[in-house]
Image (cartoon, coloured by chain):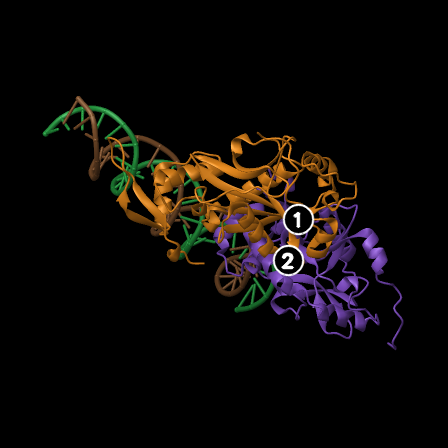
Chain colours: A purple, B orange, C green, D brown
Amino acid sequence: MNLKQPTIKQEPSSKEFEQNYLPGLAIDMVIFGFHQNQLKILLLQYQNTGLYALPAGFIRKDENLNDAAKRILQERTGLQNIYLEQFYTFGDMSRHDKKPMQKIMRGKGINAKDDHWLLSRFISVGYYALVDYTKAVPIPDLLSDGCDWYDLSNLPPLILDHQDMMAKALTTLRENLDRKLIGFNLMPETFTMAELQSLYETILGQQLRRTSFQRKLLNLGILERVAKRWTGGAHKAPYLYKFASDKVRE
Amino acid sequence: MNLKQPTIKQEPSSKEFEQNYLPGLAIDMVIFGFHQNQLKILLLQYQNTGLYALPAGFIRKDENLNDAAKRILQERTGLQNIYLEQFYTFGDMSRHDKKPMQKIMRGKGINAKDDHWLLSRFISVGYYALVDYTKAVPIPDLLSDGCDWYDLSNLPPLILDHQDMMAKALTTLRENLDRKLIGFNLMPETFTMAELQSLYETILGQQLRRTSFQRKLLNLGILERVAKRWTGGAHKAPYLYKFASDKVRE
DNA sequence: TTCTTTAAGTGCAATTAACAAAAAAGTTTG
DNA sequence: CAAACTTTTTTGTTAATTGCACTTAAAGAA
């Protein structure tokens, strides 16, 4: 069924890119989700290459950097008003390696010259986003053939320095978890205390004590107990909580 | 004595810049120092303009981003092996305002066309550095007429978004102060406990309790008491401490 | 020696976190 | 229908940290 087909959508021409986008600068996104007690990130997959990469994009000449990040996130997930934070800008020479992109373009039937704009040196601003797994609708971009969630504990090999980017994003997330109370962005509307604890444990990579965790989070005064309860087994049903954003001062 | 002189050093020509530097990307530096119980930063001053700016520079095409930052810091202070950390990348459209740079160039007798490369949109990577005030030797760059320390509590008006940059750098410094134990980089070789406390109080913008502060820092086990003491007045002389970097694990 | 002044250390209350045990709320089972 | 079982939630008890007042230490001056 899957015969070789001509590329339908065209990636931007050199001229089109130069006219509309800032040269040499890109945005890479580490989009975190949480599902079945696993921390996940969104990756693009390229056919016939075995290569995987973080979602990325470029900055329009008339666009704020942060707005470009929001746009790129929206393009890959369909989501708006998402927790999104810049965490580091990557500018080592070693990240300038033409091979992966050449392979990706060949896989798409694009015959790129050595000075194609996509093969030049890029400095990349890293952002990480925290999204509700159940709400995101992953969408591939022009060059990729798949956009899907992957377990952080079991990632495929990533191109260039994307593994380092992911690691740095995770470190930043860990450092900000308590300080900025951002974990809730990864949860659905309502959740049990055990689920929330599991999220914290997964992000921090360590076990937490049930009682301490519960007392600490409840004392923050930002959780609201929802009247309803779980349908459950032969035991006490856990309370459901929701994040009371109106109680957060800042 | 100071008659109008022709510019001696020439700023890079458009061609020279395009050949050697990454376009549209700059580095801005918030260089912190501490002297006489005041937190200070290094600013460039432009003659005949009343304008002040953070030290800045560009990235060579064959240079790592972090190496460019080190180079720029070295060019303005003469210092190497300094604590230097990237804190944010600024990319709002609103920071693209040609007027200040035009004024600076006119002040230097440069007749810049409207499409001069220095007047284009720049996205700027912010770094902050912590230096020993007594060791830095401020040096102006090609366009500026002065490079000096200014009290953080009494800054002259800065161009563009440099005030925001400074504020963000200070916030980052505050957040990292305890976590990364970086305050010592602002101190001379040896210092008294009172001086160290004054530094912390100045950075954090709040008074600290002496006993708690002392107990906490000594318990960290990273301070070494130096045998020598102060020459002093009619009272007990304070101990001198030095930072025992070999005792810091990380 | 005694006084004055500033530095450094100590003891205790108050707050916060760590650990342990008990109570609560469901369902299943005899 | 009550006893048993299971998981959630709350309540104490102990240990660690911090805030605060006070004591001790050191050095020159009277």
- Asked which secondary structure carries label 2, the reply is loop
Chain on which label 2 sits = A
Residue B25 position in % (x across, y down): 69, 50
**Badge nearest the viewer, 2 or 1:** 1
State the residue at coordinates (65%, 64%): A95
The quarter of the rendered structure image containing the N terminus of chain B is top right
State the residue at coordinates (65%, 40%): B7
Residue A175 lies left or right of residue B208; in this view the side is right
Give the class, few, some or many, for how many residues have Cα within 10 Å of label 2's Cα (few <14, many ≥20): many
Q: Nearer the viewer, residue B192 or A187?
A: B192
Q: Nearer the viewer, residue A227 or A145?
A: A145
Can residue B185 be seen?
A: yes
Question: Are both tags, 2 and 1, on one chain?
Answer: no
Q: Nearer the viewer, residue A57 or D28?
A: D28
Q: Name the amino acid, label 1.
A: Ala
**In this picture, is B145 found above or below B58?**
above
Residue C24 lies left or right of residue A55; in this view the side is left
Residue B91 position in % (x across, y down): 70, 46
Give the class, few, some or many, for how many residues have Cα within 10 Å of label 1's Cα (few <14, many ≥20): many
The residue wearing badge 2 is A91
The quarter of the rendered structure image containing the C terminus of chain B is bottom left
Checking the image for residue A233, the label placed there is none
Checking the image for residue B26, the label placed there is 1
Q: Name the amino acid, label 2.
A: Gly
Residue C12 position in % (x across, y down): 28, 38
State the residue at coordinates (58%, 56%): B67
**In this picture, is B157 found above or below A75?**
above
Can residue A177 be seen?
A: no
Q: CA distance from mark 2 to mark 1?
A: 12 Å
- Asked which secondary structure carries label 1, the reply is strand
